[in-house]
Image (tube, rainbow, N blue to C red):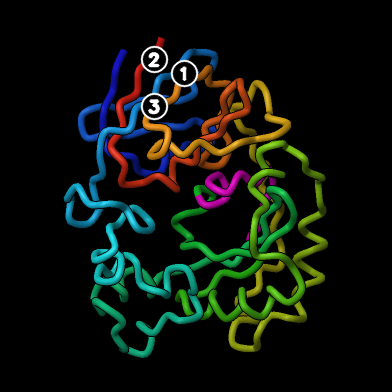
Amino acid sequence: MTYQGVLRKMETELASPIQYYLVFENDFLNINQLIGKQITMQFIKYQCLNCGLDKPIYRQGFDKQCFYETARAGDWIMRPELSTAHLGKEDRDLEYEKRAQLQPHIVYLANSSNVKVGVTRKSQVPTRWIDQGAHEAIEIVEVPNRYLAGITEVALKDYVADKTNWRKMLKNDIEDENLVEWREKLKSYIPDEALEYFIENNTETNLEFPVNKYPEKPKSLNIKKEQSYIGKLVGVKGQYLIFEDETVFNVRANEGLVVNISVS
């Protein structure tokens, strides 16, 4: 079977194990069903997720011009504390920013390679945790807008990590943590504006990934440079495809690339 389309981050479904789907314009793949099979991947061209043109991808699936123009790539996306829609102030497109920023957001703790703090829209729980390869996570604050979530994250970053070590995550070199204890320990550092939204009573969510074999020394595939790759798929974690030869491919980091995928 052969499939072709522009890469976007894999869709996921909470199950045991998590179900992964790669959605192309005319094709739909359940990645779990490909585990144990040989995959051939070939780079075809670029296709910017904003303008659709064959222009080199700069960041987040956009070419350089679109990255600096589209509202979907504003600084507030990576830095929620820069959100201004709650003040009625526009960054690039106020209506878009109101829809994205003025909705419930979660500040959470997730353990993928270590305990880290993060922010996501409430509607993206547990998708965000799955995308980060977290095997356990817990909500600690639910606020009405992105700005409040952002300033809370900034305040907590002094006491807990805000980055994931992707190699450690993929090697499954992890330790279970008591995230309820972490939540209580961090409560005193939450800004006054967000403290009333602290979640007092909840339990952590545990996630199981479809992986038959974890790599000891994961090496990242640059499909643009290599042009093509052949390998046996042995698992999926986060947004990474894991192959038997310890090659790993980050689907989300390659959004906007058109690829041909053959399964045998």
Residue denoted by label 2:
263
In this rendering, the label closer to the viewer, 3 or 1: 3
Q: Position of residue 82 (x, y in %)?
A: 45, 81
> Residue 245 occupies which quadrant of the picture?
top right
In this rendering, the label closer to the viewer, 2 or 3: 3
Residue at 69 percent of width and 60 percent of height: 116
**Circle 2 residues within 10 Å: few <14, some 14–19, many ≥20:** some
**Circle 3 residues within 10 Å: few <14, some 14–19, many ≥20:** some
Tell me the amino acid under the disc marked 3. Answer: Ser
Residue denoted by label 1:
34
> Residue 242 occupies which quadrant of the picture?
top right
Of the two numbered discs 1 and 2 on the same chain, state the one appearing first in sequence: 1
Q: Position of residue 13 (x, y in %)?
A: 47, 36
Residue extending farthest to the front is 225
Q: Secondary structure at mark 3?
A: strand
Tell me the amino acid under the disc marked 1. Answer: Leu
Q: Secondary structure at mark 1?
A: helix
Q: CA distance from mark 2 to mark 3?
A: 14 Å
The image shows residue 185, relative to residue 138, as above or below, that is below
Quarter of the figure with the C terminus = top left
Residue denoted by label 3:
228
Residue 202 lies in the magenta stretch: no
- Tag 1 and tag 2, C-beta contact below 8 Å: yes
Residue at 27 percent of width and 58 percent of height: 63
Tell me the amino acid under the disc marked 2. Answer: Val
Tell me the magenta residue range: 128-139
